[in-house]
Amino acid sequence: MSIATENEQLAHHDGAAARVLVVDDSPSVLFMLRRTLESMDLVVDTAGSLDEALRMLGRAPYRAVITDLRLAGDERTLGLELVAAARTAHPEAAVIVLTGFGNPAVMDQVFQLGATFYFEKPVSVERLKLALAGLPPARASRVPGAAEERP
């Protein structure tokens, strides 16, 4: 199946475009990911901080959450907190962690918290598209009035 066909299935299941939340403290990364995901006919929300992302999780039904591991430009791994929050708010959503500072211990922690994918930067656009193309149809989520992967 071509990526274009997979994109159509992802974005237009039941006539509604899938919504994705992208979280990174780098405006250039947010811009690049937004353009890439919108080219897949996804609705993209972006957040530049953990606090902003946590507020957004309760406002919309997300099929996927993509987050940088290190937010706020320091060595703190605030992305781990977001993984846990996303898993609670949207248990069926894919949670994708991106990092330029990965190691096996961090990778284990990310998966223990419920992440679906873990990619070390730089991650290719094609690899990210393939991860998102595998999202299942939307199902009910915990967001009131909303609809929503996890293997």
Image: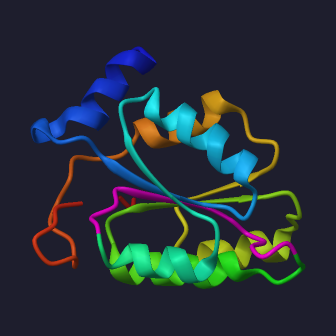
> Chief secondary structure of the magenta span?
loop
Q: Is residue 38 left or right of residue 27?
A: left
Residue 113 in sight from this viewpoint: no
Residue sitting at 20 percent across and 53 percent down?
A: 138
* Quadrant of residue 98 within the rendered picture: bottom right
Q: Is residue 100 left or right of residue 9?
A: right
Magenta segment range? 60-73
Q: Work out whether 114 lies above or below 45.
A: below
- What colour scheme was applied to this rendering of the protein? rainbow
Q: Nearer the viewer, residue 122 or 27?
A: 27
Q: Is 69 within the magenta? A: yes
Residue 142 in sight from this viewpoint: yes
Q: Work out whether 7 lies above or below 49.
A: above
Q: Quarter of the image containing the C terminus? A: bottom left
Residue sitting at 61 percent across and 85 percent down?
A: 81
Residue 136 percent coordinates (x, y): 28, 47
Residue 120 percent coordinates (x, y): 79, 52
Number of marks: 0
Residue 7 percent coordinates (x, y): 36, 27
Q: Work out whether 83 lies above or below 137.
A: below
Q: Is residue 20 left or right of residue 53?
A: left
* Quadrant of residue 126 within the rendered picture: top right
Q: Work out whether 133 lies above or below 111.
A: above
Q: Residue furthest front?
A: 27
Q: Nearer the viewer, residue 23 or 138?
A: 23
Q: Quarter of the image containing the N terminus? A: top left
Q: Is 47 within the magenta? A: no
Residue sitting at 37 percent across and 39 percent down?
A: 42
